Amino acid sequence: MMPIIHDIPKAELHLHIEGSLEPELMFALAQRNHVQLPYGSVDEIRSAYQFHNLQSFLDLYYAGMSVLLTEQDFYDLTWAYLQKAASQTVKHTEIFFDPQAHTDRGLAFETVHDGIVRALTDAKTQLGLSSQLIMCFNRHLSPESAMDTLHQALSYKDTIVAVGLDSSELDYPPSLFQAVFEKALEEGFLTVAHAGEEGPPEYIWQAIRLLKVSRIDHGVRCIEDPALVDYLAETQIPLTVCPLSNIKLCVFDRMADHNLKQLLDRGLCVTVNSDDPSYFGGYILENYQAVQSALNLSQADLLQLAQNSFQAAFLDELQKQSYL
Ligand code: HPA
Ligand code: ZN
């Protein structure tokens, strides 16, 4: 391993906090909360993590969340991720959460939000790790449900910096959520969206033009549209790429086929992130390592990726400079 991968300060910008739920914690929370899991052991959970596309992952991802019930559960989940991130020299992290996946199970928005934010606050003082929180709308649910969720978030503008769009991509174009994102922008939230993971380049264009996103999450299918690649290079709209996720969900067959290096060489603001580390077999460090060895990245490439991660973060210029 290149030691620089561990040692360089990094920002993580694409991390679903519910996707950092390790089988050990899932098992412990199931016992604490008397929730029945369809698995007999931690090993059984791990061996169930074989996916052939995004949906096959999402089915297990939403099922796993059933053990999260209390504010303390969300604290424990978030704290475990933050400790891991800090141990890999992550200095700043921007975390997604999926409120609808919890409010639809009867939990209060506040329970989810407060547990996560309490851990983020502790991470700043105890680990020197700064953060932002991004609330995602699930695109397999209706735009009305998203609008409802946005209304609930209006009391949390101090702690939620942006809204995002995740879950099943195919057949759910960003255009469905234009009105919700317009309202979010009016209310002062920044916007991001998953696009071009499984969906076509057209969904990336829609995210840019209709949802006015500051970053594209994934975005790797931009490569199919040369005009879009030109546009991304020119505007420096960042892509939060998640290499191990892309392999686990069969977006690319092998890491050697991944287009990250091509996009980097083309001058795009590409970043490396872990997406759902518990399900995809690695945190940010393992993601950097996997692309470095499969794509033969140079030290300069690695430094560029780390620098891009701060450039693309929701930090002011002064804060960015302090990390670079
Ligand atoms: N894509 C879409 N939705 C998600 C993902 C992802 O990679 N992870 C968690 N929700
Ligand atoms: Zn994601």
Image (cartoon, grey):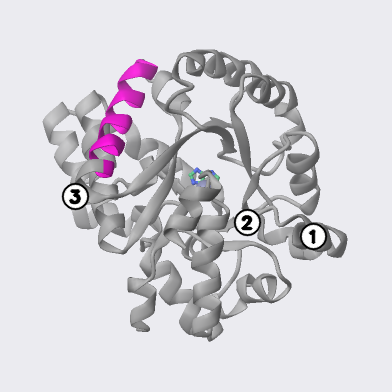
Is any atom of residue 38 visible in this view?
no
Residue stretch rendered in magenta on the structure: 108-124
Q: Does the magenta stretch include residue 206?
A: no
Q: Which of marks 1 and 2 is in front?
A: 1
- Residue at image mark 2: 239
For image coordinates 83% across by 63% down, the residue present is 230
Using the image as rendered, state which of residue 14 and residue 87 is in the foreground.
87
Of pointers 1 and 3, the one earlier in the residue sequence: 3
Above or below 216: residue 180:
above
**Split into 4 quadrants, where in the image is the N terminus?**
bottom left
Q: Could you tell me how far apart the alpha carbons at marks 1 and 3 are, in whole angstroms?
A: 44 Å
- Residue at image mark 3: 24
Q: Which residue lies furthest to the front in this view?
A: 318
Q: Nearer the viewer, mark 3 or mark 2?
A: 2
Of pointers 1 and 2, the one earlier in the residue sequence: 1
Label 1 environment density (alpha carbons within 10 Å; few <14, some 14–19, many ≥20): few
Where on the picture, by quarter, is residue 143?
top right
Q: Could you tell me how far apart the alpha carbons at marks 3 and 2 are, in whole angstroms?
A: 31 Å
- Residue at image mark 1: 234
* In-image side of 273 versus 219 (left or right): left
Q: What residue type is labelled 1?
A: Glu
Q: What residue type is labelled 3?
A: Glu
